[in-house]
Image: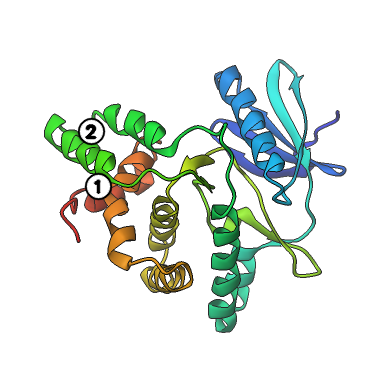
């Protein structure tokens, strides 16, 4: 497998993603845990088994001493690119985006990791928060209904590929769990709000309308998903996320 600098799609501190013929190859740094690489491949395979049409895992290999995952390449533009280049049709794009998320949430995958268990571990490990705040967050998490729906965990327009025929495909399933769709929606809302509040509000209104979900219910998840996101140690987003955690009594 020959990977060249000119074929790099994206570079992150812990991985570099290449286009290689009909594949996407994610090459992880040597410091990235081997178990995380295999776990991402396993999660993606679990999602394939639900019947959702997603880019399939081809193989897990070592390249120059680094672990890598090879995944099917899907031709097209990201939905984020289309939304940015055609803002007049944002509402139409958002309708399709929400419909796609609801299709995902209708699936089940009993062997996926449980969302509430994962969030509990993330919140427990947050040393940026004092013990009282962690306790309040964990108490709220425990009180939230436990569902078993497939949740993407990082559902945003940059992870949706739109083909030339208009078909939408969701990529990057590393954070997928089985759990509550309200939490998945809260995460998507925060990801929109990081960039533009009016777009976030448009998303929230459409999700709640199409899923027949009370907005207050999704809002109850916001401090919890903000805390989970804070555990990823992204300094650029830290202040924004802390503000949401501070509104734990937000109803």
Judge whether residue 238 can be spotted in this image.
no
Residue lying furthest left: 132
Asked if the residues shown at circle 2 and circle 1 are in contact, with their CB atoms under 8 angstroms apart, the answer is yes
Residue located 39% across and 51% down the image: 183
Q: Secondary structure at mark 1?
A: helix
Residue 85 in the image, given as x and y percentages of width and height: 62, 74
Residue 72 in the image, given as x and y percentages of width and height: 79, 43
Residue lying furthest top: 65
Q: Indicate the quadrant containing the C terminus: top left, top right, bottom left or bottom right.
A: bottom left
Judge whether residue 21 can be spotted in this image.
yes
Residue 124 vertical position relative to residue 196 in the rendered view, above or below: above
Residue 96, numbered label: none
Residue located 68% across and 22% down the image: 67
Q: As drawn, is 180 to the left or to the right of 155? A: left
Q: Indicate the quadrant containing the N terminus: top left, top right, bottom left or bottom right.
A: top right
Q: Which residue is mark 1?
A: 242
**Crowdedness of circle 2 by 10 Å Cα count: few (<14), some, many (20+)?**
some
Residue located 41% across and 32% down the image: 118
Count up the numbered dots.
2
Q: Which residue is mark 2?
A: 128
């Amino acid at each position: 497998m020959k990977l060249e600098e000119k074929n790099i799609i994206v570079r992150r501190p812990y991985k570099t993603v290449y286009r290689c013929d009909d594949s996407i190859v994610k090459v992880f740094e040597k410091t990235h845990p081997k178990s995380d690489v295999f776990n991402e491949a396993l999660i993606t395979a679990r999602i394939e088994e639900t019947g959702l049409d997603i880019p399939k895992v081809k193989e897990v290999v070592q390249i120059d001493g680094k672990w890598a995952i090879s995944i099917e390449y899907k031709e097209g533009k990201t939905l984020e690119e289309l939304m940015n280049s055609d803002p007049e049709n944002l509402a139409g794009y958002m309708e399709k985006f929400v419909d796609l998320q609801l299709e995902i949430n209708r699936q089940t995958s009993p062997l996926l990791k449980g969302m509430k268990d994962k969030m509990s571990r993330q919140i427990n490990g947050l040393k940026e928060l004092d013990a009282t705040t962690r306790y309040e967050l964990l108490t709220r998490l425990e009180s939230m209904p436990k569902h078993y729906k497939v949740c993407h965990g990082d559902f945003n327009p940059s992870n949706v590929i739109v083909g030339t025929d208009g078909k939408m495909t969701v990529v990057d399933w590393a954070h997928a769990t089985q759990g509550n769709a309200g939490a998945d929606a809260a995460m998507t809302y925060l990801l929109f709000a990081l960039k533009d509040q009016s777009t976030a509000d448009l998303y929230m209104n459409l999700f709640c309308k199409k899923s027949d979900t009370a907005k207050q219910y999704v809002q109850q998840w916001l401090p919890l998903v903000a805390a989970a996101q804070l555990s990823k140690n992204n300094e650029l987003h830290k202040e924004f996320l802390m503000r949401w955690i501070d509104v734990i009594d937000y109803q």
